[in-house]
Amino acid sequence: MNSYPKKPEFAVTSTRTTINPAYRSSSEAGYTTTRKKFTRPKTKYSLVYPYITHEELKILNDFFNANQGQKFTFKYPFEDKEKICIFAMDELVVTDNTSELCSTKIELAEV
């Protein structure tokens, strides 16, 4: 299984979201019952790359194209362990900031 590239490094404005949905149902008597949808919470990551070179973009683009639709390992710097993730997006949108720098955002989801 491939590993998400450590370089280029994403910005500190990147976010992680814990997902732990529940099923809810209401009865005619006014009671609400709930139960977890998953057996464990999952995490989504939004990785921001505000200023990267075209060479660094090529690393991300090549990894995206080679691993789209496949699982890979990812280690968020502020978490203890590696997780198995997939791309939670179908397009890699790139904004050209200057002739030498560009920016992009990558969405990952734990499986």
Image (tube, rainbow, N blue to C red):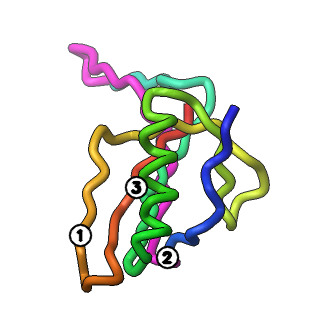
Q: Residues within 10 Å of mark 2 (few under 14, many from 20)?
A: few
Q: Amino acid at mark 1?
A: Thr
Between disc 1 and disc 3, the foreground one is 1
**Residue 106: which numbered mark, if any?**
3
Kindly report the distance in space between the C-alpha atoms of the residues bearing marks 1 and 3. 13 Å
Residue that badge 2 annotates = 11
SS label for mark 2 = loop
Q: Which residues are magenta?
A: 11-31
Report the quarter where the C terminus lies.
top right
SS label for mark 1 = strand
Q: Decide: is 40 above or below 8.
A: above
Query: Which of 85/53 is in front?
Result: 53
Q: Residues within 10 Å of mark 1 (few under 14, many from 20)?
A: few
Q: Decide: is 68 above or below 29.
A: below
Report the quarter where the N terminus lies.
top right
Specify whether residue 19 is painted magenta. yes
| Residue drawn at 33 percent across, 72 percent down | 103
| Residue drawn at 46 percent across, 64 percent down | 15
| Residue drawn at 62 percent across, 31 percent down | 40
| Sequence-first disc among 2 and 3 | 2
Residue that badge 1 annotates = 95
Between disc 1 and disc 2, the foreground one is 1
Instruction: Please provide percent x and percent y for residue 54.
Output: 40, 71
| Residue drawn at 40 percent across, 22 percent down | 33
Q: Amino acid at mark 2?
A: Ala
In the picture provided, is 25 more to the left or to the right than 4? left
Query: Which of 23/94 is in front?
Result: 94
Quadrant of residue 25 in the image? top left
Q: Amino acid at mark 3?
A: Ile
SS label for mark 3 = strand
